[in-house]
Amino acid sequence: MDDKNAEFELRPVGVIHSPYRNTSQAPYQGRRRKDISQIEIFKEFEEGLQDIEGFSHIIVIYWFHKSEEFHLLVKTPWDDKPHGVFATRSPHRPCPLGLTVADLLGREKNILKVQGLDAVDGTPVLDIKPYIPSIDESWPAKIGWLEGKLGKDG
Amino acid sequence: MDDKNAEFELRPVGVIHSPYRNTSQAPYQGRRRKDISQIEIFKEFEEGLQDIEGFSHIIVIYWFHKSEEFHLLVKTPWDDKPHGVFATRSPHRPCPLGLTVADLLGREKNILKVQGLDAVDGTPVLDIKPYIPSIDESWPAKIGWLEGKLGKDG
């Protein structure tokens, strides 16, 4: 099978319960917001959460289930120029995978309480990873076309 | 359709060419390694790379294609205790998605030259996102069971 024609199938491991009922309510980036969301990991995967509560931050990978198509060039709220989708965080991507580093406030069995997630209520969760600064942080970092555009809410 | 039974289908947008021919050659975390890999984005998606070269780091999401099963509790090289898979970076995950923040050294058309990627040669790439410190970094961060175990090579 040619690499290009490979197909991969995923089943969600959980679902996000958030205060954002639809995409227009969801912030462009929830990172600096104080809203609380809950990540429900399905019972069959609960054991996989063991020791997660020791981490202050988690990487949440989810499915942009409201994204129905993708564009290779996209305009964002940050400027008027189109940019390649891989140089943006637009949800309209060839593989509609969303990624947020969220504050893990606590865990109650199969429920994670998090802050800083910008996903719409009902968003399917594909993976949770512990956030590890020594491998996930890069400093200093250049941010190209976004330089100076994000402001305090970036 | 019940959330739990949803299925999502992905097609790769590219493939990784790396010096690691198999999983035993790949480092546990490539982040601090100097080895160079190339990410070939398939020609049909090349336009989506526009302006990516302005970013010094990118988030690469890929498919752990050598991972054939998952375990909810896993042992890692870092200690003798089993931990929940979501509290580790093990490739044997329910959704076998890999994630690395890599240094973007340059771009030549549809080829990205990167450093710090720990993926095996031939790994399918699902998504590329620009790394943006103001949303992707969290400091200070607690790393639970990994505290003090990673050392300089973490």
Image: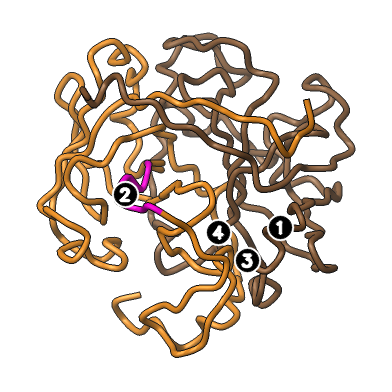
Chain colours: A brown, B orange
Looking at marks 4 and 1 on the same chain, the residue that comes earlier in the sequence is marked by 1
Q: Position of residue B128 (x, y in %)?
A: 39, 33
Quarter where residue B45 is shown? top left
Q: Amino acid at mark 2?
A: Ala
Instruction: Check contact, mark 2 vs mark 3: CB within 8 A.
Output: no
Q: Secondary structure at mark 3?
A: helix
Residue depth check, mark 2 versus mark 3: number of the one nearer the observer = 3
Marks 1/3: CA–CA distance:
9 Å
Read off the magenta span: B63-68
Q: Name which residue lies at 68% across and 54% down.
A: A102
Question: Which residue corresponds to the image point at 75% horizontal and 52% vertical from the top-left?
Answer: A42
Q: Amino acid at mark 4?
A: Lys
| Main secondary-structure element of the magenta-colored stretch | loop
First in residue order: circle 3 vs circle 4: 3
Q: Which residue is mark 3?
A: A48
Q: Which residue is mark 4?
A: A129
Quarter holding the C terminus of chain B? bottom left
**B91 vs A22: above or below:** below
Q: Position of residue B17 (x, y in %)?
A: 15, 40
Q: Are marks 1 and 3 on the same chain?
A: yes
Amino acid, disc 3? Gly
Task: Tell me: residue B55, above or below residue A52.
Answer: above
Q: Nearer the viewer, mark 3 or mark 4?
A: 3
> SS class of the residue under badge 2?
strand
Q: Which quarter of the figure is the N terminus of chain B placed in? A: top right
* Labelled pair 4, 1 in contact (Cβ < 8 Å): no
Does the magenta-highlighted stretch encompass residue B65?
Answer: yes
- The verdict on residue B114 being magenta is no
Chain at numbered mark 4: A
Residue at image mark 2: B102
Looking at the rendered structure, the secondary structure element under dot 4 is strand
Determine which of the numbered discs, if any, sits on residue A44 in the image: 1
